[in-house]
Image: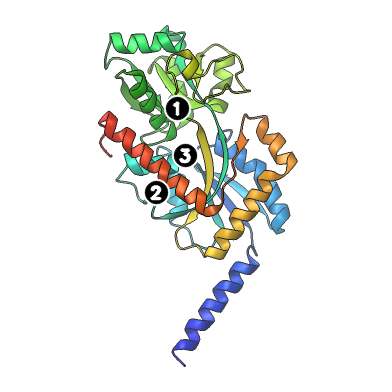
Amino acid sequence: MRVLLPFLLSITSAVTLAQDYPTKPVRMIEPFGAGGGPDIIARAISPKLSELWGQPVTVENHPGAGATAAPALVAKSSADGYTLLVNTSAQAYSAAFMKNLPYDPLKDFIPVAPLTSQAYVLVAGKSSGVTSVRELIGAGKAKPGELKFGSAGVGTGTHVGAEKFNLEAGMIAVHVPGDTTPAAIADAVAGRTDYMITPISYALADIRTGKLRALGVTTKKRSPLLPDVPTIGEAGVPGFDYPIWYGVWVPAGTHARVVDKLAQDIARALASPDVRDRLAKHGADPMSMTQPEFARFVLSESESAAKIAKATGIKSQ
């Protein structure tokens, strides 16, 4: 009984802690910097979560290392539910493309809840001379291996999306990974790369000033942010569909009751009319899944990325 008592007390303490959660400020860590998709979405839901919990919820930007700095930080954090990772689909994709990370994208995290889904946009730098998806494909097929495409880093959603586009378009190009999305966009604007797939929020200003040409959005329907830009499916690659999606993760080992509470309250925050209106202005559609459904979705997306990596002959880095 003396041996069993400490064990029972620890279980009781953990359950009580989970039921009372949160009792102190919660941090939301995102990997792409101010103004990016994860930052925008985190700042849309954080006030609502703060209201629900009666605790401050702060959003912290940790860009860098090809968007892996933030996940690395969260992976090393205490598994107590007070440090959340808000990331793009890259959290699932990176497992297929990057093996030498200081964390395991699947094993070191628990998927908590989906946030939103929206379109990326395929853009070309003005100096490339490309004005349409068909022109880009034609140039890529005419000069295999000569065109260069940028990304926010190996294994990021921008990288996987471009590889998927190249594969389905039947063209071969050279990947030039950047360290952040703004850096990759700067390469396209300066002519150091010919094209890239990027979140619309990052490219919108350069599209409007003519520094970048929007060739097509990556979803099956057009984006309200770029209503005159065709889908890639309409513009030359029938059936192409590659949305960017966002979600919340916590370190592995976080108590199941905390994970469940987070999932339920994040869903409540997303369902509020003011949050939905704010997200709609950024072309974001709230997603709805239970925590187990989201966990299965993340695994499925990781497996899809692995197939793209295999089909394109990309070796894990």
Of labels 1 and 2, earlier in sequence is 2
Residue 38: image location, x then y, percent: 55, 39
Regarding residue 31, the answer to whether it shows in the image is: yes
Which amino acid lies under the numbered mark 2 shown in the image of this protein? Pro
**Residue 183, disc:** 1
User: Which residue is identified by label 3?
Assistant: 89
Question: How many neighbours does mark 3 have within 10 angstroms: few (below 14), some (14-19), or many (20 or more)?
Answer: many
Q: Is residue 108 above or below residue 33?
A: below
Of labels 1 and 3, earlier in sequence is 3
For numbered disc 1, what is the local secondary structure? helix
**Residue 141, quarter of the rendered image:** top left
Q: Is residue 277 left or right of residue 135?
A: right
**Along the viewing direction, whichever of 162 and 239 lies nearer the viewer:** 239
User: Which residue is identified by label 2?
Assistant: 105
Which amino acid lies under the numbered mark 1 shown in the image of this protein? Ala
Of labels 3 and 2, earlier in sequence is 3
CB under 8 Å between discs 1 and 3: no
Which amino acid lies under the numbered mark 3 shown in the image of this protein? Ser
Which mark is nearer the camera, 1 or 3? 3
Q: Residue at x 36, y 35 (%)?
A: 154
Residue 182: image location, x then y, percent: 49, 28
Measure how far apart labels 3 and 2 are at the Cα level.
Answer: 11 Å
Q: Residue at x 38, y 55 (%)?
A: 107
Q: Residue at x 42, y 41 (%)?
A: 301
For numbered disc 2, what is the local secondary structure? loop
Q: Is residue 23 above or below residue 168?
A: below
For numbered disc 3, what is the local secondary structure? loop
CB under 8 Å between discs 1 and 2: no
Q: Is residue 129 left or right of residue 279?
A: left
Question: How many neighbours does mark 2 have within 10 angstroms: few (below 14), some (14-19), or many (20 or more)?
Answer: many
